[in-house]
């Protein structure tokens, strides 16, 4: 460890990672703080770390799955918030990407969806009922908005479902 006096004797330099000027405590110090040092280290070893991570996941698949399920359960609200914020901030990009993916894989997607629906008919019906029950108000609001839009513009398309949401 160097003394404060030694620190002031050295010329200020810029952090190799974030370019912030700082007073190096050692002649070899290239980063303004530990965070930058670790970030630069990770960036330089990106591929090695990715390989190590992949090997770790492969060897500990069940443990990782259990842990991430526990994490997701404990952070459900904040994860949903982050996802919503990400989707809101990247709406255009996400729509473009998924349109491109769909166009490139249309046949495969249709085949897979049909197979999934055939194999999971009951589960899908259950999920659909649960979704409707959990989002009754939102669905009713959307339908009301549809109807209002149709009233003001007769050419507006029909709502996707013909069932009436009124109680
Ligand atoms: Zn820095």
Image (cartoon, rainbow, N blue to C red):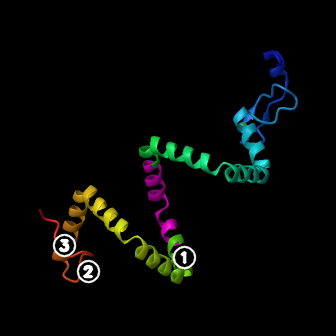
Boundaries of the magenta span: 80-96
40 relative position to 123: left or right: right
Query: What whole-number distance in Å separates the C-alpha atoms at marks 2 and 3?
Result: 15 Å
Crowd tier of the residue under label 2, counting other residues whose Cα lies within 10 Å: few below 14, some 14–19, many 20 or above: few
The location of residue 20, given as percent across then percent down, is 71, 37
Q: Which one is earlier in the sequence, the residue at label 2 or at label 3?
A: 2
Q: Residue at x 50, y 77 (%)?
A: 112
Asked if the residue under mark 3 is in contact with the one under mark 2, i.e. CB atoms within 8 Å, the reply is: no
Chief secondary structure of the magenta span? helix
Image position of 93 with respect to 27: above or below: below
Asked if the residue under mark 1 is in contact with the one under mark 3, i.e. CB atoms within 8 Å, the reply is: no
Q: Which mark is residue 163?
A: 3
Q: Which one is earlier in the sequence, the residue at label 3 or at label 1?
A: 1
The location of residue 15, given as percent across then percent down, is 76, 38
* Residue indicated by mark 1: 100
User: For numbered disc 1, what is the local secondary structure?
Assistant: helix
* Residue indicated by mark 2: 157
């Amino acid at each position: 460890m160097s003394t404060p006096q030694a620190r002031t004797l050295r010329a200020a330099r810029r952090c190799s990672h974030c370019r912030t000027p700082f007073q190096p405590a050692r002649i070899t110090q290239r980063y303004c703080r530990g965070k930058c040092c670790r970030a630069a280290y990770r960036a330089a070893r990106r591929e090695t770390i990715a390989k190590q991570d992949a090997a770790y996941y492969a060897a500990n698949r069940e443990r990782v799955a259990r842990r991430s399920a526990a994490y997701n359960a404990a952070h459900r609200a904040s994860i949903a918030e982050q996802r919503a914020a990400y989707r809101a901030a990247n709406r255009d990009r996400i729509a473009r990407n998924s349109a491109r993916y769909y166009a490139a894989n249309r046949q495969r997607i249709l085949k897979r969806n049909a197979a999934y629906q055939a194999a999971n008919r009951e589960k899908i019906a259950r999920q659909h009922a649960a979704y409707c029950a959990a989002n009754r108000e939102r669905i009713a609001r959307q339908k009301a908005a549809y109807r209002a839009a149709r009233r003001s513009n007769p050419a507006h398309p029909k709502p996707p479902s013909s069932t009436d949401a009124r109680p």
